[in-house]
């Protein structure tokens, strides 16, 4: 009866809801776009696949927190489509920019019975994953009726919210019973959910917001903008709201008298306020440079050194780059009674963080940071100005605060792996024993800031020296090296020939950082990702090198990585062979069959070219170099993979002479590819 009254009240409030969307759309047209989605219409035409996993994240903060988990779910279930939903246009923009075509996306419909019914009918999910406490009664009830498991991850429940739930216990208690698995951020939240009457499985897995996934484009942005900020003291005011920008602009001239090189970088929370904030800067008589003034696509044009007072970050998805360029960070939504925003993205980069008194949305995090002396809390704008003077004057103190925050951030990691393991147990019906068995395929050693994975069959123990070419040279164990952009060394270890490869960055950012990658969890680092993928492919019967050891060496905010794999004996890559002779028809077909086997298993090779395909003396085809590769659901990327390979043959033919490649060879490769697909289809 209570749920029916709830639904009736939604219908009564529908005119006000539509009025709200219209009001918001005056400043942000996105609120009146895709309105049909919010009522569950047209989803069958919009989404390519049904089934799989639906992940719901309300807005930008939840989306960013969910990204590492989503990437891991894609690896865990490459054959299942992942659909990511949200409720705000900014959340939608973040999903599309950060996850792209790798996931399906739509808005979660409003909690009307008909809208929810259309949504579930179109998607037919096997599992619904909800971030934090976005609990909608009709959605949960409908999932229960369809036997769709619901997992609430990163769940948090403050004492204040728990009191509110208790007032409506007759309504909330049945609602909570529709949750299959509840993964709480902390033990206090878990206790409060149990006290409210939740009788299902509760586990404490930690806070996903400590598992920050830094987009690859962030490093490029930092390298591009860094020269423009040369000589400036950068004070980033992030996620600001109306009422805060005015206070910040009022205190800026006073601060600049003491710090002439001070640059205030304002990043409003909502894009519809960009123009308004630009107008406030003009009214204050301050000079302004807007991020939207320049497109970064033309990297040949250097950015000028910025001389303006204020920079307006009127762009989406670039806040992490601004944080990295900052000397000091103020987190908005806290000088007014908005409740604050997530400080962890700035803490992750070792930045000193300031906040106003209103941070109740992230109360636990701020209190923990306060205990670690890793945040500066102020009561009002006057105290903010004073703390800014103190922190900018005391460089060593400011950096020490940032370091304490970064240390705390690292100590809290691990939530993503625990969350995915719990979901895997639910979805696949497996137990922890299967995960433990996989982990026993290699041993793990931690030494200082370094973590090593290694095969006991190759190494009884391992250390940093095993990943240093000069150490192997001292042992007179180097038996050769590769040529190319970056050198790989062939080394002899006991009875095994191995390849030692150090990971380097490419592109423009590689000229600055070379071999340094932004810090991320060990499991998702470059070497360990390739190690895991190679191990899995070998288990599936693919001819790929055997990984024997990997290294993850952390230093501050960056890490370096190395990989040791077994050398494929008596083999050459196709480019080397084609400089000496033409391939036979059967060899071309064998190459095509090997690629088809890889695609059938859903493995996407990010750099499939003729130098990453090997032939040994027996005629066996091997595939190599799986850096930045991943498991995916079968889709158009398989054709794009083949197109990339074809381009590499034509490119090498234009560079090398002789090079025994003819366009007439390509159909033979495709014949082998198609025959393998048909053979597998017939076997199935």
Image (cartoon, rainbow, N blue to C red):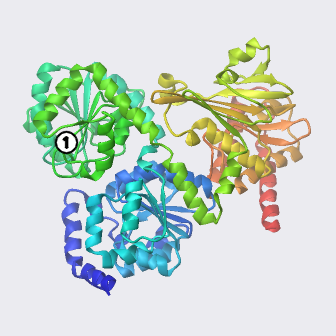
Residue 249: percent from left, percent from top: 13, 35
Quadrant of image for the C terminus: bottom right
Residue 261: percent from left, percent from top: 21, 20
Q: Which of 582 and 520 lies nearest the eye of the viewer?
A: 520
Secondary structure under tag 1 reads loop
| Horizontal side, residue 684 vs residue 209: left or right | right
From where the camera sits, is residue 568 visible?
Answer: yes
| Horizontal side, residue 346 vs residue 427: left or right | left
Residue 235: percent from left, percent from top: 24, 30
Quadrant of image for the N terminus: bottom left
The vertical placement of 252 against 184, above or below, is: above
For label 1, the residue is: 356
| Horizontal side, residue 536 vs residue 372: left or right | right
* Residue for point 87% across, 31% down: 570
The vertical placement of 623 against 102, above or below, is: above
* Residue for point 77% across, 42% down: 544
């Amino acid at each position: 009866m209570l749920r029916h009254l709830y639904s009736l009240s939604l219908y009564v409030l529908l005119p006000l809801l539509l009025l709200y969307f219209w009001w918001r759309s005056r400043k942000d047209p996105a609120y009146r776009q895709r309105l049909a989605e919010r009522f569950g219409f047209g989803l069958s035409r919009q989404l390519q696949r049904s089934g799989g996993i639906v992940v719901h994240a309300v807005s930008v903060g939840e989306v960013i927190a969910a990204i590492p988990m989503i990437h891991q779910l894609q690896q865990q279930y490459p054959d299942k489509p992942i659909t990511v939903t949200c409720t705000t246009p900014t959340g939608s923009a973040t999903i599309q920019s950060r996850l792209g075509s790798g996931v399906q996306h739509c808005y979660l419909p409003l909690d009307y019975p008909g809208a929810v019914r259309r949504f579930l009918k179109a998607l037919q999910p096997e599992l619904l994953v909800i971030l934090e406490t976005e609990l909608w009664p009709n959605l949960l009830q409908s999932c229960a009726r369809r036997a769709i498991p619901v997992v609430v991850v990163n769940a948090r429940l403050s004492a204040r919210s728990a009191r509110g739930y208790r007032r409506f216990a007759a309504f909330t208690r049945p609602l909570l019973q529709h949750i299959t698995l509840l993964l709480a951020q902390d033990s206090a939240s878990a206790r409060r959910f149990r006290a409210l009457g939740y009788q299902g499985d509760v586990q404490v897995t930690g806070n996903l917001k400590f598992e920050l996934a830094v987009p690859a484009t962030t490093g490029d942005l930092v390298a591009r903008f860094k020269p423009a900020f040369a000589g400036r003291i950068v004070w980033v005011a992030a996620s600001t709201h109306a009422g805060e920008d005015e206070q910040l602009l009022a205190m800026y001239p006073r601060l600049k008298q003491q710090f002439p090189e001070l640059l205030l970088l304002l990043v409003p929370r909502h894009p519809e306020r960009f123009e308004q904030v630009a107008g406030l800067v003009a009214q204050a008589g301050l000079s302004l440079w807007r991020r939207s003034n320049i497109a970064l696509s033309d990297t040949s044009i250097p950015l000028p050194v910025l001389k303006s007072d204020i920079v307006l970050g009127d762009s989406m998805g670039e806040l992490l780059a601004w944080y990295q360029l900052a000397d000091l960070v103020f987190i908005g939504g806290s000088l007014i009674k908005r409740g604050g925003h997530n400080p962890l993205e700035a803490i992750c980069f070792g930045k000193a963080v300031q906040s106003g008194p209103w941070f109740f949305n992230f109360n636990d995090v701020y209190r923990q940071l306060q205990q670690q002396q890793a945040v500066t809390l102020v009561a009002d704008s006057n105290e903010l100005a004073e703390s800014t003077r103190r922190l900018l004057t005391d460089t060593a103190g400011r950096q020490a605060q940032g370091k304490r925050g970064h240390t705390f951030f690292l100590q809290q990691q691990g939530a993503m792996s625990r969350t995915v393991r719990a979901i895997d147990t639910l979805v696949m019906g497996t137990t922890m024993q299967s995960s433990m068995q996989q982990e026993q395929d290699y041993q793990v050693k931690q030494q200082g800031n370094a973590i090593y994975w290694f095969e006991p069959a190759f190494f009884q123990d391992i250390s940093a020296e095993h990943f240093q070419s000069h150490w192997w040279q001292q042992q007179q164990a180097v038996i050769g090296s590769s040529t190319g952009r970056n050198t790989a060394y062939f080394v002899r270890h006991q009875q095994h020939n191995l390849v030692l490869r150090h990971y380097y960055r490419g592109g423009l950012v590689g000229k600055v950082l070379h071999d340094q990658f932004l810090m991320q969890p060990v499991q998702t680092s470059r070497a360990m990702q390739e190690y895991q993928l190679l191990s899995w492919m070998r288990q599936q019967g693919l001819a790929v090198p055997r990984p024997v050891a990997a290294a993850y060496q952390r230093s501050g905010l960056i890490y370096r990585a190395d990989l040791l794999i077994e050398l494929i004996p008596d083999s050459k890559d196709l480019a080397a062979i084609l400089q000496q002779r033409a391939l036979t028809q059967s060899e071309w077909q064998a190459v095509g069959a090997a690629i088809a086997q890889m695609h059938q298993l859903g493995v996407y090779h990010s750099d499939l070219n003729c130098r990453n395909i090997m032939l040994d003396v027996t005629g066996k085809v091997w595939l190599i170099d799986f850096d930045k590769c991943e498991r995916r659901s079968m889709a158009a990327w398989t054709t794009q993979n083949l197109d990339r390979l074809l381009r590499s043959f034509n490119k090498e033919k234009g560079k090398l002479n002789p090079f025994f490649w003819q366009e007439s060879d390509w159909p033979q490769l495709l014949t082998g590819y198609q025959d393998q697909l048909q053979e597998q289809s017939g076997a199935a």
